[in-house]
Amino acid sequence: MTQLHRVFILLCLLLSCGMQTTAHADSLAQEVELIYQSKLKDLFLYFHQNPELSTMEHQTSARLADELALLGFTVHRGVGGTGIVALMENGEGPLVMFRADMDGLPVEEKSGLLYASQAKQVDPNGDEVFVMHACGHDVHITSLVGTAELMAAKRDQWRGTLMLIGQPAEERVMGAAAMRADNLWERFGQPDYAMAFHGEAKLTSSVGASTDSPYSGADTVDIYIPGVGAHGASPHRGIDPIVLGSQIVMGLQTVVSRSLPPRRPGVITVGAFHSGTKHNIISDLAHLQLTVRSESAADRTLLLDGIRRVAENMGRVAGLPEGRLPTVIVSNESVPPTLNDKALTERIMAVWDDHFGAGTVFSGERLGMGAEDFPVFTVDPYIPSLYFAVGGTPAADFARERAGGEPVPSHHSPLFKIEPDASVTLGVEASVTALLALLGD
């Protein structure tokens, strides 16, 4: 065989492989579209119009569990509260977990959508509030059902065990911990890999991931500041906790800028300041509510120690005795950073590149320090994991924003909306492609 013949045969093989890859991608996309039109479109509307608050996702959990049971999964309900675990065993192979969060937010939807949520629910404080899926969780659980249906239909293409998790209370970063406390791995097996995705305000038809940390660690912190009450006309007779609290707020701004190395990100935000009852009364107590974001355990300790140092020493400056200095309380609503496994992420992104082709897969910079409780599943013990993003905003919306028009709404906004057709179908296709790569070897 001549060298020319060898080159010709190699080119033919490469062309044939490319045609098969394209045909396979087109075939999967068509399967996803059929499932979307026949089932998922209506299921998304149900989830969107019937959101439920964290730890109270009773109808959502029941509907998701029923859908997965109909597809042949062994479904366990009530795990960690309203959580569900659905298992499909299919021979010898790895155990792969895929998680979708279920809870909505106490937000009144003002998106203008014809199917906007009008749901209300009594919250844990006894107040009736509007509820909305303002963070894409309706997309996540709808896509999970589509992923389950395709994986069940493609059992001849993979081996192992698929574990699908419907997680409660992600918005309050409590659900993953509750499921772990309910002996999740001991009862159902510890996964070899774990995955989840988030519907993002990124361009539809785009999917991507970071090879390091897509989300930060988060802590909820309260500072209680005692004072000495007095008449507003006689401030010298008291110690004003509002003035002291204001000094603490300003002092906290130096913790990040003067304690963290400049190339290591961190955030300390004072989200609420409560004190006083009347114009001419100096209160005897102030309360600050903070969110703190960090990228490592060391930086978390540095920030929390800095908060205590500022609060206590500003109390000394104000003349408070040692036994009545400001108190810093770190809530148990805390999560570590989400850290993608580099090897796993690169492997799956290469699979997506082959499947979707150029222009679909992205790896963009982070512009904020959002947090997730997904790493509670994966940090201790360590499980190689991938948390990825699926775009859900049409190009026309970004074009309008660039032209000076209405901006694209952020997550947790009453105006938030996601394009369900594109985001659900892409979420399913990306999830199935990744799962087949891990379970199909």
Image (spheres, rainbow, N blue to C red):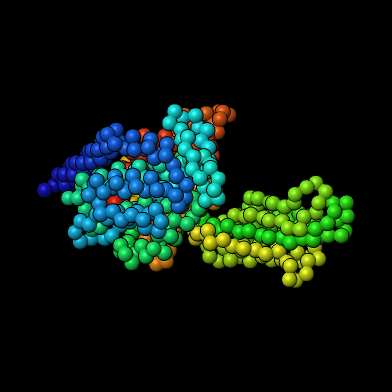
Give the quarter of the image for residue 160: bottom left
Give the quarter of the image for residue 310: bottom right
Q: Residue at x 45, y 44 (%)?
A: 52
| Residue 371 image position (x, y, % from top left) | 51, 53
- Residue situated in front as seen by the camera: 88 or 362: 88
Q: For the C terminus, which image quadrant?
A: bottom left
Q: Residue at x 50, y 32 (%)?
A: 111
Considering every residue shown, the one lying at the far front of the view is: 126
- Please give left or right for residue 369 compared with residue 143 in the image: right
- Residue situated in front as seen by the camera: 93 or 235: 235
| Residue 435 image position (x, y, % from top left) | 29, 51
- Please give left or right for residue 398 compared with residue 237 in the image: left
Whether residue 370 is visible to the viewer of this picture, yes or no, is no
Q: How many marks?
A: 0
Q: Residue at x 73, y 71 (%)?
A: 323
In the image, residue 392 sits, relative to residue 440, either above or below, namely above
Q: Residue at x 23, y 41 (%)?
A: 24
- Residue situated in front as seen by the camera: 399 or 225: 225
Considering every residue shown, the one lying at the far bottom of the view is: 322
| Residue 93 image position (x, y, % from top left) | 23, 60
In the image, residue 49 sits, relative to residue 327, either above or below, namely above
Whether residue 81 is visible to the viewer of this picture, yes or no, is yes
| Residue 301 image position (x, y, % from top left) | 58, 66
